[in-house]
Image (cartoon, rainbow, N blue to C red):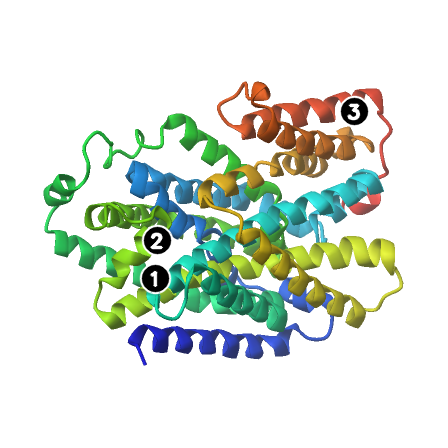
């Protein structure tokens, strides 16, 4: 048996063992499954937000982009880190104090049922897009590890089965505890690969000589450009303020202070990963100039000593596992809590709701696998999907910090405006008056909320929910 296959099987067995251990903690009711019974410590919050952020986009995606433009691609992960820090400093405590399960519960306290339904739809769409990208990254990794066993599509299928299975078994406890193993693997594997490959090349001068001319490979700004870097930072701070999977991590903390501490430390500790993945993308360009960009980082690592190659590629796959599990869980939680229990079966007990959450995890996993088969660029696709969180951010900032100005009608119209703009941006180039859709989203969503609040000033009573 190839060493890499043995290591991969060992890693998968370890993940499922952790999940079965976590299953004991997650049983009983839906809150235990979806929020770990609100008992997560700061270290578990820390590794869980790192695990969510450092997925396929932050490793394979950054490497793919660095293969084309250089080290500045690492700004994607730095932007994620900044977003987590902002969430920790300003929002995690506020969310945890609300004693909610989903972001749409907060929306409903101030807005209409129409806003709740549209909000659930938009949040699920965003997360399904991101999950699908984890399958793409997972497929490329498994194909690189064992090309005689996995092609790109079978690699995605195996990834999907593993991601869905782990989440289905243990919920938030499974995602959090498995991230302890995942983060150790990711950091050790990528750091070791970076050091070894740099020693093989010999020096920065040798690396520079092996790269094509006329590309700013070693600039931290010029390759991607300040406009795109700023767009990433704005988008990912926006995402951290209002994406359900991120909110769900903060709600799982044992108290508000723990949530804040876990997010801040998570943001700080994820900073180096993007730079290392980008550097390995440069190494891949020097070693395999004609390789497919998405396979660049895995190909470099395959050239390492077999045991280290297996561990490092398992680490990259671990990044996808950690992200996909949180996203599958949050998609299932949104549907079971905000659609099934609220509108379809309000009298359902905890056991029935837990069953529905698990069923939604399986359905979401299958849908995203189909989507993954038709997506090509990781970073390009993910940034489009994430921009829709601007509408949610506008709504929750008003709800958490300025509830006296909340308008009952504004939630629905803000979400609708954000969704329509995203469709128009994709289909009608004439509306692209800003360099990135995120700026347009913020402008349109703020305007939509303000106009709706002026035209329909009626407010929902919030005093009872503000404690």
- How far apart are labels 3 and 1 at the CA level? 52 Å
- From the viewer's side, name the closer residue of 70 and 395: 70
Q: Residues within 10 Å of mark 1 (few under 14, many from 20)?
A: many
State the image coordinates of residue 197 (x, y, percent, origin top left). Answer: 19, 56
Relative to 99, is 106 above or below? above
| Residue located at (58% from left, 31% from top) | 426
> Disc number at residue 144?
1
Does residue 334 appear to the left or right of 306 in the view shown?
right
Q: Residue 152 location in percent, x, y?
A: 43, 59
Check whether the beta carbons of the residues at disc 2 and disc 1 lie within 8 A of each other: yes
Q: Is residue 102 left or right of residue 309?
A: right
**In this rendering, which labeled residue sits more in front, label 3 or label 2?**
2
Badge 2 marks a residue whose secondary structure is helix
Is disc 3 surrounded by few (<14), some (14 to 19) or many (20+) residues within 10 Å? Answer: many
Could you give the CA–CA distance between mark 3 and mark 2, rounded to whole angstroms?
Answer: 47 Å
Which of disc 1 and disc 3 is earlier in sequence?
1
Give the tally of numbered discs: 3
- Location of mark 2 (residue): 295
Of callouts 2 and 1, which one flags the residue occurring earlier in the amino acid sequence? Answer: 1
Secondary structure, mark 1, is helix
Residue 252 in view here: no
| Residue assigned mark 3 | 452
Of the two numbered discs 3 and 2 on the same chain, state the one appearing first in sequence.
2
Q: Say which element carries label 3.
A: helix
């Amino acid at each position: 048996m190839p060493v890499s296959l043995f290591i991969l099987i060992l890693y998968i067995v370890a993940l499922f063992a952790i999940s079965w251990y976590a299953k004991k903690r997650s049983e009983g009711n839906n809150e235990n499954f979806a929020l770990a019974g609100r008992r997560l410590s700061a270290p578990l919050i820390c590794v869980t937000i790192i695990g969510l952020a450092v997925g396929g986009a932050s490793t394979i995606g950054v490497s793919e982009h660095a293969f084309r433009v250089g080290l500045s691609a690492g700004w994607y992960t730095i932007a994620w880190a900044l977003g987590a820090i902002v969430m920790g400093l300003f929002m995690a405590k506020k969310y945890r104090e609300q004693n909610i399960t989903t972001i749409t519960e907060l929306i409903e306290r101030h807005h209409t049922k129409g806003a709740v339904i549209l909000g659930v739809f938009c949040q699920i769409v965003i997360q399904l897009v991101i999950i699908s990208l984890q399958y793409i990254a997972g497929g490329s990794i498994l194909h690189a590890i064992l090309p005689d066993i996995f092609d790109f599509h079978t690699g995605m299928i195996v990834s999907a089965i593993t991601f869905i299975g782990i989440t289905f078994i243990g919920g938030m406890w499974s995602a959090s505890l498995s991230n302890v193993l995942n983060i150790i693997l990711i950091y050790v594997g990528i750091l070791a690969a970076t050091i070894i490959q740099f020693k093989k090349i010999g020096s920065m001068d040798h690396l520079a000589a092996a790269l094509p001319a006329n590309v700013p490979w070693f600039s931290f700004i010029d390759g991607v450009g300040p406009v795109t870097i700023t767009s990433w930072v704005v988008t990912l701070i926006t995402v951290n303020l209002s994406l359900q999977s991120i909110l769900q991590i903060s709600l799982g903390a044992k108290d508000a202070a723990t949530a804040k501490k876990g997010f801040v430390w998570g943001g700080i500790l994820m900073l180096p990963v993007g730079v290392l993945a980008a550097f390995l993308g440069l190494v891949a360009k020097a070693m395999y100039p004609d390789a497919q960009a998405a396979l660049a980082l895995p190909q470099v690592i395959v050239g390492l000593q077999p045991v280290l190659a297996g561990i490092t590629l398992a680490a990259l796959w671990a990044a996808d596992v950690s992200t996909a599990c949180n996203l599958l869980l949050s998609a299932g939680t949104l549907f079971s809590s905000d659609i099934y229990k609220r509108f379809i079966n309000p009298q359902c007990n905890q056991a029935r709701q837990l069953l529905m959450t698990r069923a939604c995890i399986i359905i979401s996993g299958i849908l995203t696998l189909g989507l993954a088969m038709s997506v090509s660029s990781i970073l390009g696709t993910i940034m489009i999907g994430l921009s829709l969180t601007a509408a949610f951010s506008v709504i929750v900032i008003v709800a958490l910090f300025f509830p006296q100005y909340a308008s009952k009608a504004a939630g629905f119209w803000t979400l609708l405006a954000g969704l329509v703009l995203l469709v128009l941006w994709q289909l009608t180039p004439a509306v692209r008056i800003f360099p990135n859709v995120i700026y347009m989203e913020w402008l349109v969503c703020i305007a939509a909320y303000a106009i709706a609040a002026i035209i329909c000033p009626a407010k929902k009573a919030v005093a009872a929910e503000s404690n």
